[in-house]
Amino acid sequence: MHPVARAPVAPFGRAKAQPRSRTRALVAAVLFGASVASAAVPRPAFAKGPASLADLADQVTDAVVNISASTTVEARGGRAMPQVPPGTPFEDLFEEFFNRRGGKGGERGDNDAPRQQRKSNSLGSGFIIDASGIVVTNNHVIGDANDIQVILHDGTKLKAEIVGKDSKIDLAVLRVKPPADHPLKAVPFGNSDTMRPGDWVIAIGNPFGLGGSVSAGIVSARGRNIESGPYDNYIQTDAAINKGNSGGPLFNMDGEVIGINTAILSPTGGSVGIGFAVPSDTAKPVIDQLRDFGEVRRGWLGVRIQNVDDTTAEALNLKGGARGALVAGVDEKGPAKTAGIDVGDVIVKFNGAPVKASGDLPRIVASTPVGQKVDVVVVRKGEEVTKPVTLGRLEDSDKPQLANLRQPEPESATRQALGLNLSGMTDDLRKKYAIKDTVKGVVVTRVDPNSTAADKRIQPGEVIVEVGQESVNTPADVTKRIDALKKDGRKSVLLLVASATGDVRFVAVGLE
């Protein structure tokens, strides 16, 4: 028997009995007052949920397809191991048995076994966006498959070819040839930016290979970052999404696709009411480029960024509190360098769009056309500055290089500040901490474990390059700069800290 939750009882003591006539009068007064109050204060009007979703499902189901992707791989051994559910004890049992049989006398061992072909299959979902035969699904559904079939709602199987795919957004575009006697039905994209938490949605797909299934729910949240890639901006929904739903559409009540179901958060592998879909407004530009070019051509700014917290905002004298993307590195050959964007700038607006957090910037830049000239608003030393930038093209092979930092004269004297033991750069310290020759600044040789610097994970062997956005060459420069900031009434200081290999990051440390 399940326990029943009970409301707590307030200790008001024993109620005193009232005469019946007086009691009736009190009841009448209370009821009258309640009715007056109800009439005087209008209740908020809430739209009713749909009585049935059957008409909507009928309207769009024919455009939703199942995806079967097969990958042929080479396998060794003269015997085919039975196909068993992955992750079960039987998988290990059969693998051990067949490996043992393959190594015994009279049988061929692994090294001399003939090569065999083995197929690996996956199932997913997709949807038709163009009746000419254009289908959208997830990249992870097709993977490296060399045989892809699109299965229509009525069971018709069509061979598909890959038009293009993108692993960063996890999208793929396929093309099929419609049968002459079987016109395809397509569904349109809707505007995902208009969706609000609480709006009704339905998901249609192929969960666990069962075939077309409809589930309903609401938008639970927007802008979710599940750390699956650089452009996370998912719609979260409680509409049931399971394995096999990947690549399927998430519809609004007008039958428009406002999301592409991509991932679930679940300890069991099944739906627990937390599913994620790529918003249509994020997906559409990627799909258009895959159709036009077979690849995605993303805008590139050429900066490395980090988030701005409250302490960092105070240290930077950033009005309006924590916001924007803090520039921690600038590529020497990138558009930002040419435009005059510097390390320590905080990007707060890009091409008219506000940058509320660092995660916003990569998405906005990537969706901006290559070669477009845009205005980038940065905060530099407390003042807003506008920098016109002509975007380059992001290449997967590009590895941002940091801006060349200072060339200070080394000093071996040591000092203490902020809970840190500091030393000028020497050949011995470079050797001890394996610090690259290109890294210049003041070396941290010890960190007080009870200091704020320790809380911010500053480590011995790291190098302080800037203090309060001014370069430092010696330990004396560090203490002098800190003293000046204290006199100005600052409560924290922003350090630019380099690793032994030259990677830099900003760290805000309290001065109290």
Image: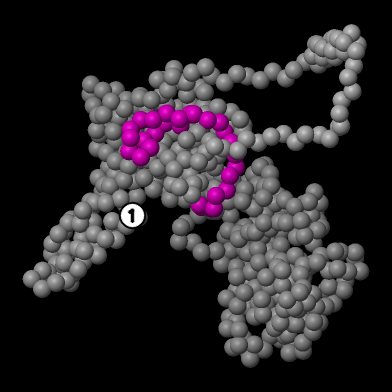
Q: Residues within 10 Å of mark 1 (few under 14, many from 20)?
A: few
Work out whether 34 lies above or below 318: above
Instruction: Pinpoint residue 221: horizontal percent, then vertical percent.
Output: 60, 38
- Residue type beneath disc 1: Thr
Q: On the image, numbered disc 1 is attached to which residue?
A: 88
Q: Quadrant of residue 214?
A: top left
- Residue 88 shown left or right of residue 453 in the figure: left
Region of the chain picked out in magenta, as a range: 202-230
Q: Secondary structure at mark 1?
A: loop
- Residue 163 shown left or right of residue 445 in the figure: left
Name the residue nearer the viewer: 61 or 432. Answer: 61
In the picture, the quarter occupied by the C terminus is bottom right
- Residue 115 shown left or right of residue 332 in the figure: left
Instruction: Pinpoint residue 92: horizontal percent, then vertical percent.
Output: 29, 61
Residue at the spot 79% in from the left edge and 62% down from the top edge: 315
In the picture, the quarter occupied by the N terminus is top right
Residue projecting furthest to the left: 106
Residue at the spot 48% in from the left edge and 44% down from the top edge: 264
Residue 225 in magenta?
yes
Instruction: Pinpoint residue 354: horizontal percent, then vertical percent.
Output: 68, 44
Residue 315 in magenta?
no
Name the residue nearer the viewer: 133 or 119. Answer: 119
Residue at the spot 24% in from the left edge and 59% down from the top edge: 94
Instruction: Pinpoint residue 34: horizontal percent, then vertical percent.
Output: 82, 14
